[in-house]
Image (tube, rainbow, N blue to C red):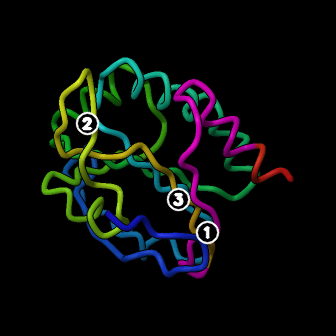
Amino acid sequence: MQTLTAGQTAPDFTLQDQNGQSVSLADFRGKKVLVYFYPRASTPGCTVQACGLRDSKAELEKLGVVVLGLSPDTPKKLLNFVTKQELNFTLLADEDHSVADAFGVWGPKKFMGRVSDGIHRTSFLIDEQGTIAHVFDKFKTKDHHQVVLDYLNQ
């Protein structure tokens, strides 16, 4: 697993959102995009992380940042997550984890003594030209939004 780093071009992708609509990274050229990968909708850690971003949306927008959350869930599961948590940003279904593979965040994980392949919780700040400006990979789910805001405000 080779995670992409700052300075590299972000791989373009098109995935279905929670409403079954196609969304491409290229749709956001000219804007900063936070692409955040999370393991599974409606799990405790993923919910805390998503709600932190939800509650920070106005601040992120002031800084010109659009949020896209990616997980291997189906659009139906994503819609349930968005509805239940009143999320105010787009979630994308990376069901075959091809985008996670392209960003280098799919691979072996250890959980409760068992090793299995899955998403490594990582976020990429992509600049207006499609280049990775920063990689966030060391944070607690409850602090993720603040780590991103602190970086953007420095």
Q: Quadrant of residue 71?
A: top left
Q: x, y percentage for residue 12? A: 36, 76
From the viewer's side, name the closer residue of 109 and 122.
109
| Magenta range | 129-149
**Who's the residue at 73% across and 43% down the image?**
149
Task: Name the residue furthest front.
Answer: 113
Instruction: Locate residue 71 relative to residue 138 in the image: left or right.
Output: left
From the viewer's side, name the closer residue of 113 and 8.
113
**Who's the residue at 20% across and 56% down the image?**
97
Q: x, y percentage for residue 144? A: 59, 36
Type of amino acid at the residue the image marks with label 3:
Phe
Q: Secondary structure at mark 3?
A: strand
Disc 3 target residue: 124
- Measure how far apart labels 2 and 1 are at the Cα level: 24 Å
Q: Secondary structure at mark 2?
A: helix
Disc 1 target residue: 31
- Measure how far apart labels 1 and 3 are at the Cα level: 14 Å
